[in-house]
Image (cartoon, grey):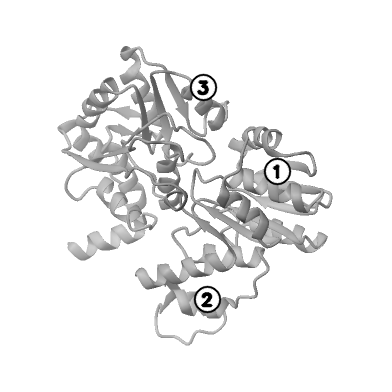
């Protein structure tokens, strides 16, 4: 196995505390393994549970044995960090989750381990370094030993608002809320900060790639779907709009009083047409009930169906490896399980419904990207027309923001 030029340059030039902010499919994992091989004797890898086996395989492939690696899931490290013996280095993978939130228990556990053992080699890996909040960049800076001031960072990247007119003393300080500043200037400043503490590389920086093709198709609600929305109505706006979002794909999750419900809708018919006409298709969804619905919908086609969600016993990377070997295949993928696996033999991804998270959407798109790919990738978004939750989520994530039920409810109130 051979390293690319950008990987060799990073191994030679990266600081001992450094971010490998490579976009997906650019080769973060081999680079981190070779960094450890050349600089330390022992290293802890902290990664999502779903890619533990993948990390073990990658270490066998890329390591020359100079470094001993101990691989932990995020949950294992958070619970056992006080018992884990000292290692020379920490490698954090998919750090946009947990590591990117200085208030999270995982972040606090990592900081405690660093301070206890005086760790001087820390490499942070993610393809989505900037999440929906600038605090992710600030959180990385703490782990990488930068002395950035919290108040200065907040003033630079957030607008603050007061609730009420009382003096902000004692517990009343909690009445200050913040909102990230927006605009190309702010995004450029955050990118510059990332470049000061890590290597930032996009796939297009190392290879001429074929442009992706995105499309949107709109569908109207039928009578059965409107009935589901009526049944799912709740005075709590978060519950109400969640139920509406489910109904826009023809499902309604049950509660303590009602079982799950399912109706046929126009999206189903279009999905069947797309999948039947394609050799390999990934259908992305938000709710597990949709996975059950689509599995039944596609059974008659006789195409192998693979499922990626938080419910499967097999890891996402193991499922992906099996699907890659098939000439024809359908993958049903929950939108929030989007990290650490490759589906480069697939070129068509259909979003039947979308995750609320910009990071998860961004990560999911890159599952079908690859350096050696010479054909375009196609992304189809199936959205309910009108003032729909589908549309609101799409509008948020394309602006690199998470969808907020509270903000959506406020916008609806202002329109009324």
- Residue hosting label 2: 153
Task: Classify the position of the N terminus by image quarter.
Answer: top right
Mark 1 Cα shell of 10 Å, populated few (<14), some (14-19), many (≥20): some
Q: Earlier in the sequence, mark 2 or mark 1?
A: 1
In this rendering, would 376 be left or right of 72?
Answer: left
The local secondary structure at tag 2 comes to helix
The local secondary structure at tag 1 comes to helix
Q: Position of residue 71 (x, y in %)?
A: 71, 41
Q: Position of residue 384 (x, y in %)?
A: 21, 42
Residue found 47% across the figure and 66% down from its top = 191
**Residue 322 marker:** 3
Q: Position of residue 89 (x, y in %)?
A: 75, 54
Of tags 2 and 1, which is closer to the observer?
A: 2
Q: Earlier in the sequence, mark 3 or mark 1?
A: 1
In this rendering, would 123 be left or right of 292?
Answer: right
Of tags 3 and 1, which is closer to the observer?
A: 3
Between the C-alphas of marks 2 and 1, the distance is 31 Å
- Residue hosting label 1: 76
Between the C-alphas of marks 3 and 1, the distance is 27 Å
The local secondary structure at tag 3 comes to helix
Q: Residue furthest bottom?
A: 167
Answer yes or no: is residue 180 visible: no
Q: Quadrant of residue 373?
A: top left
Mark 2 Cα shell of 10 Å, populated few (<14), some (14-19), many (≥20): some
Q: Earlier in the sequence, mark 3 or mark 2?
A: 2
**Viewer-proximal residue, 80 or 171?**
80
Task: Classify the position of the C terminus by image quarter.
Answer: bottom left
**Viewer-proximal residue, 349 or 213?**
213
**Viewer-proximal residue, 235 or 156?**
156
Does 196 appear above or below 381? below
Does 409 appear above or below 192? above
């Amino acid at each position: 196995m051979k390293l690319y030029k950008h990987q060799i340059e990073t191994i030679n030039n990266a600081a001992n505390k450094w971010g490998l902010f490579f976009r997906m499919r650019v080769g973060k994992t081999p680079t981190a393994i070779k960094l450890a091989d050349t600089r330390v004797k022992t290293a802890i890898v902290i990664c999502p549970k779903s890619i533990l086996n993948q990390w073990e395989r990658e270490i066998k492939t890329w390591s020359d044995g100079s470094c001993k690696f101990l691989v932990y899931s995020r949950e294992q490290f958070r619970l056992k960090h006080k018992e884990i013996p000292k290692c020379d280095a920490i490698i954090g993978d998919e750090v946009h989750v947990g590591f990117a939130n200085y208030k999270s228990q995982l972040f606090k556990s990592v900081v405690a381990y660093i301070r206890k053992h005086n760790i001087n080699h820390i490499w942070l890996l993610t393809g989505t370094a900037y999440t929906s909040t600038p605090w992710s960049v600030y959180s990385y800076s703490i782990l990488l030993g930068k002395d950035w001031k919290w108040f200065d960072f907040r003033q630079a990247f957030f607008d603050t608002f007061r609730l009420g007119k009382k003096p902000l003393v004692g517990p009343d300080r909690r009445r200050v809320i913040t909102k990230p500043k927006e605009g190309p200037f702010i995004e450029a400043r955050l990118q510059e900060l990332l470049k000061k503490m890590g290597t930032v590389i996009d796939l297009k920086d190392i290879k001429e790639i074929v442009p992706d093709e995105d499309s949107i198709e709109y569908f109207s609600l039928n009578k059965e779907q409107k009935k589901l929305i009526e049944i799912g109505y709740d005075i709590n706006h978060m519950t109400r709009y969640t139920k509406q979002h489910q109904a826009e794909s023809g499902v309604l999750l049950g509660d303590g009083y009602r079982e799950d419900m399912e109706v046929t809708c126009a999206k189903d018919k279009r999905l069947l047409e797309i999948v039947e006409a394609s050799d390999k298709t990934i259908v992305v969804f938000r709710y597990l009930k949709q996975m059950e619905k689509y599995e039944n919908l596609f059974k008659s086609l006789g195409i192998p169906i693979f499922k990626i969600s938080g419910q499967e016993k097999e890891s996402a990377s193991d499922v992906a490896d099996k699907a890659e070997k098939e000439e024809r295949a359908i993958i049903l993928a929950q939108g929030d399980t989007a990290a650490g696996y490759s589906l480069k033999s697939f070129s068509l991804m259909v979003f039947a419904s979308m995750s609320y998270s910009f990071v998860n959407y961004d990560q999911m798109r890159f599952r079908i990207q690859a350096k050696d790919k010479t054909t375009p990738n196609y992304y189809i978004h199936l959205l309910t027309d009108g003032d729909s939750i589908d549309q609101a989520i799409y509008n948020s994530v394309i602006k690199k923001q998470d969808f907020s039920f509270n903000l959506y409810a406020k916008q609806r109130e202002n329109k009324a």
